[in-house]
Image: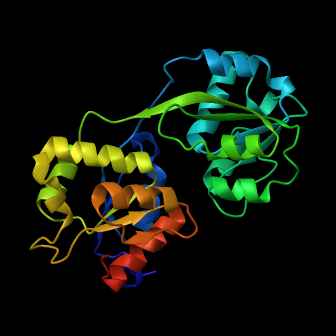
Amino acid sequence: MTGTTLPLAGRCIGVTRAEAQAGEARQLFEQAGAAVVDLPALVVTPPDDWGPLDDALADLESFHWLLISSSNGAEALDARLRRLGSGLAHRPHGLKIAAVGRKTAARLAELGAPADFVPPDFVADSLIEHFPSSAWGLRLLIPRVQSGGRSVLADAFGEAGARVVEVAAYETRCPQGLPSGAVAALEQGRLDALTFSSAKTVRHTAQMLEAAFGSSWPALLQSHPRRQRPLAIVSIGPQTSRACQKLLGRVDGEAQPHDLAGLVAACSATLSSGRRD
């Protein structure tokens, strides 16, 4: 495929994922022809307190299902189990795993613990809608981010009669600031789009923009002499889009499906249309 046929050829895209997870997104955007500027918006750390997770893991045999909604959750859970002398690959025989999203399922497979169920759409709501059995009487373990995550899984399965234990397995915090390369790209109007993969990346990016540029930071999202039009804001899914609307004032494109490949496609479509909401 030649450079002129690549959908994002000549475009410069800002990626706001966790620094340790930016590689896959960078690769997909570069394969589409884009130049990528990293704006890491998450730092993955342990939770403040391991106690609730360790208590749940000590009682792992009592659970019927493990519901994992992110690759961070899969990695954190496996790492903690390994410290305790086990691992997801050696979980109790009767414990099934449900995974939200293709990436989460792929990471579980890499860890030797392939998911027993992956919903057709890569959002938590789809897991609830398509769950393969009645939730009544089931005991479910939901490892999640310490703050900022949705409790929709726990709430919905609890209402359906399941006994749900939801515990913090990791935390995602705001980095200390924007990299100098990202600051320069924003100042010079080189970015064509900013992409967001979670509501928390939106929130942290807004915080870092204000710290770097002061109260006038929203002007960076508007037209620039080099770009001639507003910076495109592209989201991976509904929750992230709502955060974009609230904190950035708009969202110009949303991935469908809600994964990195969908994010690249949505970015290409948004920039090709020239539309800004």
Residue 201 in the image, given as x and y percentages of width and height: 39, 48
The foreground one among 3 and 258 is 258
Would residue 11 be found to the left or right of residue 105 on screen? left
Above or below, 6 against 78 in this view is below
The residue at the point 35 percent across, 83 percent down is: 272
Residue 247 in the image, given as x and y percentages of width and height: 31, 54
**Which quarter of the rendered picture does the C terminus lie within?**
bottom left
Color style of the picture: rainbow
Give the total of numbered labels: 0
Residue 85 in the image, given as x and y percentages of width and height: 73, 16
Above or below, 218 against 62 in this view is below
The residue at the point 40 percent across, 76 percent down is: 268
Would residue 252 be found to the left or right of residue 261 on screen? left
Q: Quadrant of residue 219?
A: bottom left
The foreground one among 261 and 135 is 135
Above or below, 49 against 30 in this view is above
The residue at the point 15 percent across, 78 percent down is: 228
Would residue 152 be found to the left or right of residue 272 on screen? right
Q: Quadrant of residue 218?
A: bottom left
The foreground one among 203 and 161 is 161
The residue at the point 52 percent across, 31 percent down is: 146
Is any atom of residue 40 visible in this view?
no
Q: Quadrant of residue 41?
A: top left
Is any atom of residue 203 visible in this view?
yes
Residue 194 in the image, given as x and y percentages of width and height: 32, 61
Above or below, 260 against 209 in this view is below
